[in-house]
Amino acid sequence: MPVAQTRLETLQVCKLLQCVRMKEKNQIEKMTVNGIPHLINYNDASEGLTALGVAAAANDDEMIEFLLELGAHPDVPDFKGRTAAMRAAEFGHVQCLEKLTKAGADMKSIDLEGKGILFYCISPTERHAKCLELAVVNGAESNNMSRDGIPVFMFACETAAENEDACLLLLEKGSDPNGKQEKTGKTCLMAASLSGSVKVVRAILEAGGDVNVLDIQHTHAAHYAALTGGFEVLACMSAYGAVFDQCNNKGNTPIHNAALNGHAMCCKFLWQRGCNPKPKNNDGETAKSLAKEKDQKEAGKELRKAEKAFGKVGKNNEPWAIVLYDWVMEQSQKILNAYKRFDPDEKGTVQKDEFSDTLVGMSAPAEEADIAKVMTLHDKARDGNIDYNDFLTGKKWMNKNYLMSAFEGKKKKKKKGGKGKGKKGKFKLAMPICTSEEGPRTYGGAPPEMFIERHIHFTDTGRFDRDRPPKHPLQDDSAWYLQHPEKMYININDATKNGDFDSLKGAFQKGTPVDTRDKYYKTPLMVACSIGNIDMVKFLLENGAYINARDNFKWTPLHHACHSGQLDVVSFLLDNGAELEAHTMNGGTPLTRAIESSREGLVTYLVDRGAKLQTENKKGHSPLDLANSWADPRVLNFMQARCDGLPAGDKKGKGKGKGKGGQKSARPTSVPPPADKENTGPIPFSASGEDLPSRQRKGSILRAASALASGVDEEEDITYIPLKAWTKQPTSQELIQEKRVRRDRYGWEVDFPDFEMPFMKNVTKKNVAMGDDDD
């Protein structure tokens, strides 16, 4: 392996490799004749590349043939020990590998990691499969082991689900089925079980693989199969005598692994085949508790059954019968072919002697007495003939819960019934949940319109804070020496929820609509009402928010305000034109939302304002019905008293239409329209010129000289705009006062993380009460 060392050798090797890539055969021939001796076999100084290796990696079989004719040796490796044949196999270049094998390339060469050519052939493509077959036929070592102690067959089994044909070919060519990694003790069977390939697992076991071997962590192959939900793999291992009741060093059994990932059928199969579901692992977890912790409901259901039934022997589920059944299911085709030889007339029956001799000859895992029991069950007519097709189903001698058909998915039966029969089911309102797309980006690549620029209070905190503000705008010169923060964006509804007035002011000044909606069609006013922030509600209405807007469930801001249970917000909305009898998609009114929040004062206020008591929602529930289901006794008593006081005619006729309620207006009349921006739009033309504003003439030297001569003073604009203006911050005393106000409005729980708004608080109380009743 000559390596380019001198300047001349390095340049000539680089030129040769470049010519190989460019397919310049004439130049290559000149260089081999006139260049340094054996140039064709030199290695590049950087990575050890050879001309033959470059051609093999480029899939240039014509160049390989040309280089071989010039004397290139096929077994010259690069600095990683890879020959040209390995490079061709790595990329699946079949034609190149054929040329190299014909030239006598050594298929038993290994690289610096101890990997032979077969390691490079393991890949899930047809081209790599052909390369593998070509390498094996030409003498590649099928039991090659890398320096890490990994056999090539185990390396293939790790991806057996994708490389089944490659694994079967290696096994056919003599790979050890019991090969294992030296450091971990992991076997080929474990690797194939983890990949989930039942075809490879079956081939390993048929070739003599040990099904019950453990690695250094005492992990069984069943642990790996259960981890990925390989039910068919577990069934195959059970047929070859696998012992599933194994604990690894962490105390986990295979059933723990199956429960962890929610493989319910694996859990059922394992406990039926002898894996105890009751032991705890080193963390004190049983399989059932693991399933519960991971919210695996189906697995938990099977494990509850397992803990009750494990160890109990019933009819047709004796251990010998289970073992024999699994073996029969695995060998069913061979058994069927054997019995057909005794049944040339295809009657489907054989004699008792033929039946038992066949099973004994195939080394069935059952005693002669057990086989005799099976024959007795199938010979009801006592004529000595046994239906072997019936035997292969196992239905007469095996419990139906242990049959393979019990692990298939059950199909739901269609319910029979005609029109007008049976009970009428509960009314289910079809409720489409409409969501809106975010929309395109705004001008300049900014996020969609619902995201506004977040206001960041930018100042030198070592000089100024909320209790030590600058005395005048010019004092805060922080913007001239501090690094400016990057732009950040926030959802307009999140800014409303957080009370970020500064971000909202900036957005509205830049032209963001005050009624911008999120994906659920909610406006900032709805969010402010849902959290009961009266200051934010006033601010949004002052900026022109639509007071009767509706979200995707047809809720108005008044519905959200009633749900929050804040009387002052509801009163303010009604005073500004909110619709009192607005109906949601399911027919709910603001009154029903107030009843659900269980606020007596709010319910009383709405009724006094004229809210109708005779409405019904889509389920036919009146406000009194909802009070009976949702509200506390005070609200229920109030509603009962008001409904009892209604005239007889009003009680019978329940209004289903929308009432007028308060005054309904398209826009709040008390809210002044937003001020027009200055200098926006063209100046209107007037013939007389009286209505036009005076226009400032452009400056000029002659006019300035004339003004100086006449003694007229020129007005000069000395307005200064700071680079970053100080944002007014609430002082510590104001923040404390704000906390007091919040406690007065929402209660003392508002300062704690588990605080709930009135509606959710009412629901929580109901749930706790129902739980106490159940106990």
Image: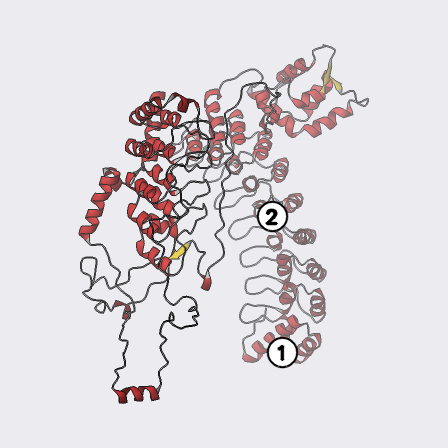
Q: Residue at x 60, y 44 (%)?
A: 160
Q: Looking at the picture, does residue 412 appear above or below residue 505? A: above
Q: Give me the disc on residue 141.
A: none
Residue type (three-letter) at the residue carrying disc 2: Asn
Figure colour scheme:
secondary structure
Q: Residue at x 38, y 68 (%)?
A: 679
Sequence-wise, which precedes: disc 2 or disc 1?
1
Residue 683 is drawn in which quadrant?
Answer: bottom left
Neighbor class of circle 2 (other Cα within 10 Å; few <14, some 14-19, many 20+) is many
Q: To which residue does mark 2 refer?
A: 143
Picture layout, residue 213 above or below residue 7: above
Q: Looking at the picture, how far across and down is residue 549, in whole percent? A: 42, 45
Q: Position of residue 612 (x, y in %)?
A: 38, 31
Asked whether disc 2 touches disc 1, contact meaning CB atoms under 8 Å apart, the reply is no
Q: Can the viewer see residue 775?
A: no
Residue marked by disc 1: 36
Secondary element at image label 1:
loop
| Rendering coords of residue 704 (x, y %) | 31, 86
User: Which residue lies at the image location 62% right of the left edge and 73% below the top edge?
Assistant: 18
Kindly report the distance in space between the C-alpha atoms of the residues bearing marks 2 and 1.
41 Å
Amino acid at the residue labelled 1: Ile
Task: Depth check: give the residue in front, 217 or 336.
Answer: 336
